[in-house]
Amino acid sequence: MSGLFPGFLILSAAMFSVGAAGVLVRRNPLVVFMCIELMLNSANLALITYARYTHTMAGQVFALIVIAVAASEVVVGLALITGVYRSGRHLDLDELSEMSE
């Protein structure tokens, strides 16, 4: 099992890097949310890998907390995106600095 430990952490780091690059490069809010979800899932993979390596349940507990935070973030974010889209404004993160019309 210890042979897989570095592989999962390398995969987690690669996933996090792709998500971070997507957040920094993309301007579409939906793509940014998908990249944030990718970053949170990579953190979950690292947490569960460490929990499996140390034979504790702490990683799974923290992963469940991260999943709950990610779900609430998606609900609030998609509600904001839907509100902006329905108001007829262009969905560009650079132009959406304020919520007023």
Image (spheres, helix red, strand yellow):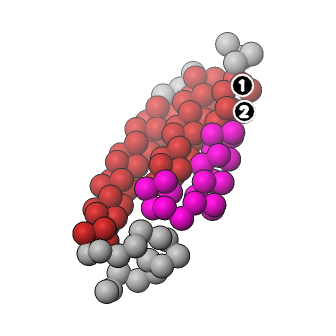
Q: Quadrant of the N terminus?
A: top right
Magenta includes 22?
A: yes
Residue at mark 1:
7
Q: Which residue is at 30% across, 55% downward?
A: 75
Q: Which residues are magenta?
A: 13-32
Q: Are marks 2 and 1 in contact (CB under 8 Å)?
A: yes
Q: Which quarter of the figure has residue 4?
A: top right
**65 or 78: which is nearer to us?**
78
In the rendered view of the protein, which quadrant contains the C terminus?
bottom left
* Most foreground residue, 52 or 92: 92
Magenta segment's dominant SS is: helix
Point 66% across, 27% down: residue = 8
Q: Is residue 25 left or right of residue 82?
A: right
Residue 18 coordinates in the image, percent (x, y): 65, 46
Q: Residue at x 58, y 60 (%)?
A: 26
Q: Is residue 39 visible?
A: yes
The span from disc 2 to disc 1 (Cα, nearest Å) is 5 Å
Taking the spot 49% from the left edge, 71% from the top edge, the residue there is: 93
